[in-house]
Amino acid sequence: MKVSIITVCFNSAETIEDTIKSVLSQDFKDIEYIIVDGGSTDGTLDIINRYKNDIAKVISEPDNGIYDAMNKGFRSSAGSIVATLNGDDIYAEKSIVGQMAEFIETKDLDAAYGDLVYVDRHDTEHVKRFWQPGPYKKGAFYCGWVIPHPTFFCRKEIFEKHGYFNDKMQIAADFELMLRFIEKNQIKVGYLPEVIVKMRTGGKANVLRGMIQGNKEIMKSFHLNNLHMSPRFFVYKPMIKISQLLGRFRKFNNENIKS
């Protein structure tokens, strides 16, 4: 069983090597690694080229945003299971890809996801926020529940059946895709209570303008999928984020969040 990992990046010279090493060091050997670069000019491609013999495919060209780039990677992939790991993120352990693939196979799932930790940009051992979504329950999306997209592993046939990312969105296309797959089409999804990805803090959706645009796109996501959005969504969503921030004070098992 082949797993395709897609890394999307643009001018990521500061962090891309950590991401590449994180994928190449996985103990699951049947990985197809694809990097989709938006035409970097900062030396990112020089770093990628150091590992070109271990990377299945490198696409470097201008794109129409991160979700357009992700779609390029997914469509060109050959794996039966696909996932993304962006150019400033890393897997929490060397066994993550194997764990997720086995979980999907043994439980006969369409997709699976897990926990995520936000870490300091320069010190990936410094946890700043803990995202523990818990198991999906029907209707959860209406109450502000969201899956940490970087932890999402899914059978490619689900994308082929239900569609890829809506690349007309700039921030919340990952939310729209999860809403469409899980809430609308009720794919069989499982939760693995393990830290899957370390995500460096920062990013477009974290600034005020991005948050406003993201919320507009979330509302549009419900409309596009003919789902009624409850006013409770924007009440519960901030509460969930507060609980994630409080989660940083949990006592983590160091083996679960090491590089």
Image (spheres, rainbow, N blue to C red):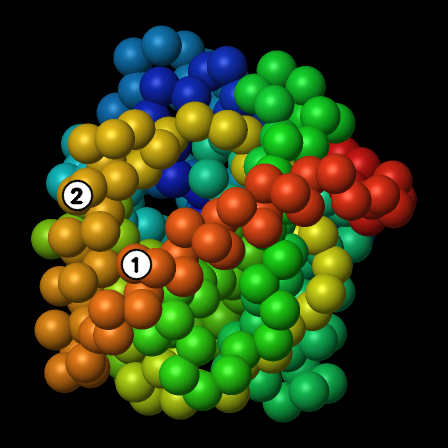
> What residue is at 12 percent from the left and 73 percent from the top?
223
**Label 2 CA crowd tier, 10 Å (few <14, some 14–19, many 20+):** some
Task: Tell me the quadrant of the picture where the N terminus can be found.
Answer: bottom right
Mark seen at residue 234 = 1
Task: Tell me the quadrant of the picture where the C terminus can be found.
Answer: top right
> What residue is at 78 percent from the left and 44 percent from the top?
250
**Residue hosting label 2:** 213
> Which sits in the foreground, 25 or 169?
169
User: Do callouts 2 and 1 mark residues in contact (Cβ within 8 Å)?
Assistant: no
> Which sits in the foreground, 171 or 94?
171
> Which sits in the foreground, 137 or 12?
137
Q: Earlier in the sequence, mark 2 or mark 1?
A: 2
Question: Based on the displayed image, in which of its 4 quarters is residue 65 positioned?
Answer: top left
Q: Is residue 24 visible?
A: no
* SS of the residue under disc 1: helix
Mark seen at residue 125 = none
Q: Position of residue 193 (x, y in %)?
A: 72, 65
Q: Position of residue 104 (x, y in %)?
A: 64, 78
**Label 1 CA crowd tier, 10 Å (few <14, some 14–19, many 20+):** some
* SS of the residue under disc 2: helix
> What residue is at 38 percent from the left and 39 percent from the top?
8
Q: Amino acid at mark 1?
A: Phe
Q: Amino acid at mark 2?
A: Gln
Q: Count the numbered circles shown.
A: 2
Q: Is residue 141 visible?
A: yes
Q: Is 204 above or below relative to 235?
A: above
Q: Work out how far the residue at label 2 is from the one at label 1, CA to CA, in angstroms.
A: 14 Å
